[in-house]
Amino acid sequence: MLCAGCSREGPSRPYVARVGSVELREGDLAGPADSLARARGKSMAFINEWVVNELLYQEAQRRGLADSDQLREQLEATRKRLAIGALLEKEVYGAGTEEVSDEDVAGAFKKSVSSFTLREEVARVSYALFSERDEANQFRAAVLRGSSWEDALAACRRDSVHSRALRAVARNQYFSQGTLFPEELWKLARTLPKEEVSYVVKAAAGYYVLTVHAIKHVGETPEFEYVKDEVRERLLIERRRIRYEQLVSDLRTRHKVEVNLAVADTAGATGE
């Protein structure tokens, strides 16, 4: 309804559609996306929707609903919510609250490390997936001969045949039973000694070679990197809570606030 009447006045150019004296003009179709994020265009769907909206809006006007007390109250409530949202965005959610250093995050983790106890097993894993078994075996053999995992991957990429067979890699990524597929990989990750190179695992996607850098069990404290984003988010929420409470406290000192408890108790008792 708020944008139903697009062009009530303007230059005398051909209109695209008209309902009564209200016209939809060519310039209106070239405007920004509407509130439903649909780009305006010369499509019959948009034009028909505009016509229906305008018909409904004009009927609401005819019945006096567009200027009713209820509508004015709703518009005022909406205006207040938007204004409050703009204030909080500026004073609480913005104003540098997003700037949380890694040092702050690490410090917050140390202070509340006991609250991050794992509820499921988590493994930090690297793997390489090949389309051919021979290339997977050669990569595994290179690591077993003493090459680091990264050096073996780099050598693989330099070789045209091996690079074509290399389908995917994971480097020091965290996985749980629900995120490491296929199931054979998770079973292997739980039993493979730390930093040992696995045998070649055949799966539907190809041939995997895997190594486990660390594994944490239920009830243990996770590695910092695993919960780093969660700690940062908690820290942001806490800072925003403090800023919000400080804002409200400052406003209470600057404005006179009165609450008539007798009336409030009566209204609450009667459900008003």
Image: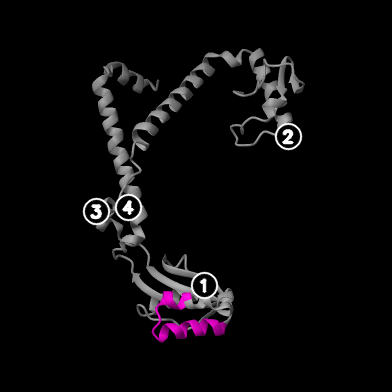
- Residue 114, position in %: x, y? 25, 58
Tell which circle, 4 or 1, labels the residue nearer the N-terminal end: 1
- Count the marks: 4
The amino acid type found where label 1 is placed reads: Pro
- Residue 36, position in %: x, y? 60, 35
Tell which circle, 1 or 3, labels the residue nearer the N-terminal end: 3
Judge whether 20 appears above or below 142 on screen.
Answer: above
Give whichever of 264, 137 is nearer the camera: 137
Q: Which portion, as a residue range, is magenta?
A: 133-154
Q: Any mark on residue 162, and which?
A: none
C-alpha span from label 1 to label 3: 37 Å
Tell which circle, 3 or 4, labels the residue nearer the N-terminal end: 3
Between tags 3 and 4, which lies in front?
3
Tell which circle, 3 or 2, labels the residue nearer the N-terminal end: 2
Tell which circle, 2 or 4, labels the residue nearer the N-terminal end: 2
Q: Any mark on residue 107, and which?
A: 3
Q: Which residue is mark 4?
A: 231
Judge whether 48 appears above or below 128 on screen.
Answer: above
Q: Which residue is mark 2?
A: 45
C-alpha span from label 3 to label 2: 56 Å
